[in-house]
Amino acid sequence: MFEGSFVAIVTPFKNGKVDEEGLRNLIEFQITNGTNGIVPCGTTGESATLDHAEHSQVISIAVDACKGRVPVLAGTGSNSTKEAIKLTKEAEKAKADGALLITPYYNKPTQDGLYRHFEAIAKETNLPIVLYNVPSRTSVNMLSGTVKRLSEIKNCVGIKEASGSLQQMSEIVDQCGDNFSLISGDDPLLLPILSVGGKGIISVTANVAPDKVSKLCAHAAKNEMDEARKLHFELMELNNAMFIETNPIPVKTALGLMGKIDPELRPPLSPISEESLSHLKTVLRKYSLIS
C-alpha cells in the first residue's frame, strides 16, 4: 500500500488558521500529477505547531479530499507515548489508511524504550504503522536491530528512513524481509535508497514537482534504471533548494511563488532570507515552475 511517491504535504495557513481550500487544491494538484499517496501532519506539515483540533482537521480534510483515490498516511507521532496513541486513534477514526510515527524527540529513549513506545501504539490501533527515523531532528537513531524487532509486530509495515546511512538502510532491508517497506525520507538519496531495496519515498520535493518524483519511483520499480538515473540528476538542484533553510520554509515559499498557497509559516519558523529567496527563484525558473 505504501509504495511509490508519497508527498509530505505542507499545511497551508491563512491568518493563523488552517486554509482548507488551499489544502484541498494542493491535494488535487498532487493526485493529478501522479503522486501515489498523501502524508498530512508530518514535519513538512508543521505538525509540531498544530494543536490537537487542527491535527484532526488536517487529516480529515486529506481523507475527504482524496476520496479513496490514493492512500492517506497520517502523521500521528509524539514524544509522549500516550499522546501518540491518542493522535493515532483520531486518525483511525477519520479513516486514514495508515499512521506515520516519528521516534520520540527530546526524550532520547534507549533502543528498548523505542521498541516499547511503538509496541504500545501498535497494540492500540488496527491501522498499519510506518515508523519514522530522522536523527537530525530527534537526537535519537533507531538502529536496524530495533526495526527488525518492530517489523515482527503485525501492523508495523514499514519505516521512513532519514538517517542518511545507506548501510543502516541496507541492514533493514536484509533483516526485515519483503513484507516490510523501506521508504526514503530524504529526497537527494531517493535513487540510492531504491537501489538497495527501498519501495518509495515520503517527499518534500514532490510538493512542487510531483510528476518528476513519481516518475523516478515508477521507472525504478520497473527496473528502468537509466531513466530513473536521469531524473535523479535532473532533480538534484531542486532537491538542494528545498533544504537551503529549515524545512518547510523553502518549500512553502516555493508554493507561494507558484501561486498555489499563501506561504504563511507558523512561528517559530520565520520567512526565508533575501539571499535564499533569490537563489530559490533562480532554481524555480530553471525548472519552469515560475516565470
Image: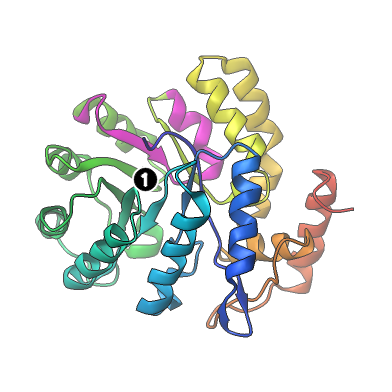
Q: Is residue 24 above or below residue 186?
A: below
Q: In the rendered view, tell whether residue 211 sits above or below residue 90.
A: above
> Relative to residue 280, is residue 146 drawn left or right?
left
* Number of residue marks: 1
Q: Residue at x 37, y 44 (%)?
A: 161
Q: Quadrant of residue 26?
A: bottom right
* In the foreground, 163 or 41: 41
Q: Position of residue 131 (x, y in %)?
A: 28, 49
Residue 278 in the image, given as x and y percentages of width and height: 82, 64
Can you identify the residue that label 1 sits on? 160
Q: Is residue 76 left or right of residue 18?
A: left
- Is residue 164 left or right of 287 when viewed as pictured? left
Quarter of the image that includes the N terminus: top left
Query: Depth check: 114 or 215 in front?
Result: 215
Visible residue check, residue 8: no
Magenta-span inclusion, residue 189 = yes
The residue shown at (31%, 43%) is 159
Which region shows up in magenta? Answer: 176-195
Task: Using the image, determine if residue 6 lies above or below residue 261.
Answer: above
Circle 1: residue type = Lys
x 54%, y 43%: residue: 187
Q: Quadrant of residue 106?
A: bottom left
Along the line of sight, which residue is nearer the eye, 265 or 40? 40
Secondary structure found at label 1? strand
